[in-house]
Image (spheres, rainbow, N blue to C red):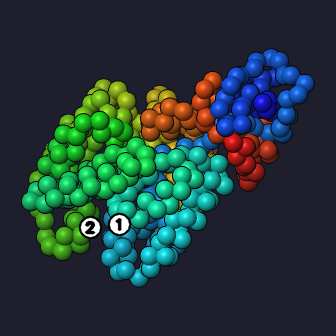
Amino acid sequence: MPIYTAALIHDGNRFLPENSAIVVNENGEIIDILFHEIPTEAIRFAGLLCPGFINAHCHLELSYLQNQIPKHTGLVDFLIQINALRFQNKFTTSQIQNSISQAEKSMRANGIVAVGDICNGLDSLQQKKLRNLQYHSFVEIMGILDNNAAERFEDGKEIVAQFRQLHASTLVPHAAYSVSDTLLSLINSLNNNTPISIHNQECAAEDEWVRNGKGDFQKLIDSVLQRSFLPMPKNNSSLVHYLQLLQRTANILFVHNTFTSAEDILFAQEMIPNRYWVLCPNANLFIENTVPTIIPFLMQQQETICLGTDSLASNDGLCIYSEMQILRKHFPTINSEKLLQFATYNGAKALNMDSLGSFQKGKTPGVLHISNWVRKQEMPEKQNIELLH
Ligand SMILES: [Zn+2]
């Protein structure tokens, strides 16, 4: 049974003391962790060993839209373009399927072992059947008109049923601005529908739209509905509004949080015991040309932070390591021990994937080797990653 040791071992929560080792069986199961004793037969690696990375937010089905949308358009124009491209049908089924397969392959090469993946349809189902990666499928629904809420809900449930034949899947709202209160309440009526993911405050206009019923989102909503729509002002921030309509016991993954306020973070802390803040900084830079400035405040709840890549429509690659690097660049005080925890343990917890995310006896988290990461606080610019198990 192989015993691995390395200059640095991070167990998902912290760096292990020097002269530690992990015992792994041929199925990748962690059999033991050894502290301060390295048997002579141990295999010694240069650099770092850590659990496989968890991508807590991706849209595999949008992989064919890589390089289709210019950077820095802002969210409203980005979504208008996504919507237009999806309905133009200029890509063939095989182009879409190939892009999904290539995107999955690149995630594996980047050390990702599990993905929280958003699905609007069944495009990613075939690839997921191959079980190259572990997935939680979040079947996303939207609809701001009350008269089609029941239909959207039923359609979504049918898609969930298909993905559930492969792995755990849940029905989730797209975002506060794209679901009606009726649709949100229908989602909330489901039992065992956890974790839930929601795109949260990705641009400044979201709060203005929910709170006051006006602003830049009018253009998006009118363009999607092909008619003018008058919303009801909710007199609350987007997050406060929708949390009043969602179950308190579910894991809730707030995705992006680019324009979330400290008050909203404290409100969520009060209301939702199992909350997770999913950061996708490369996508935020791609779309809004900013990163969430709230991150230093959020570090008070650092056990709730996880990382996602978003889709290839809004990112140059699907790489959790690259998300860690961008965070490090913008917030140099976040140490690498924490970044690795966001990338592994926290993501697994958010997705309810108990066997992943940490080196603990009985788990099969994947063993990543980054050969050129040799000093704790010095993340190499270009990483050499291989997945040993
Ligand atoms: Zn997204």
- Rendering coords of residue 146 (x, y %): 11, 56
Q: In this view, does 91 lie above or below 344?
A: below
Residue 306 left/right relative to 232: right
Q: Which of marks 1 and 2 is nearer the N terminus?
A: 1
Q: Nearer the viewer, residue 218 or 131?
A: 131
**What residue is drawn where x is 13% and y is 65%?**
229
What is the crowding at mark 1: few (fewer than 14 residues within 10 Å), some, or many (at least 20)? some
Residue under pointer 2: 220
Quadrant, the C terminus: top right
Residue 98 left/right relative to 74: right
Q: Which of 228 and 161 is in front in this view?
A: 161
**What residue is drawn where x is 13% and y is 49%?**
182
**What residue is drawn where x is 14% and y is 73%?**
227
- Rendering coords of residue 293 (x, y %): 46, 44
Quarter of the image holding residue 140? bottom left
Is residue 338 visible from the viewing direction of this image?
A: no
What is the crowding at mark 2: few (fewer than 14 residues within 10 Å), some, or many (at least 20)? some
Residue under pointer 1: 79
- Rendering coords of residue 57 (x, y %): 46, 50
**What residue is drawn where x is 22% and y is 40%?**
190
- Rendering coords of residue 177 (x, y %): 24, 55
Q: Which of 367 and 79 is in front in this view?
A: 367
Residue 87 left/right relative to 364: left
Q: In this view, does 286 lie above or below 80?
A: above
Is residue 205 visible from the viewing direction of this image?
A: yes
Q: What residue type is labelled 1?
A: Leu
Going by the picture, which residue comes out furthest to the right? Answer: 40
Quarter of the image holding residue 158? bottom left
Going by the picture, which residue comes out furthest to the top? Answer: 36
Marks 1 and 2, how far apart at CA: 7 Å
Q: What residue type is labelled 2?
A: Leu
Whether pointer 1 and pointer 2 mark residues with C-beta atoms closer than 8 Å, the reply is yes
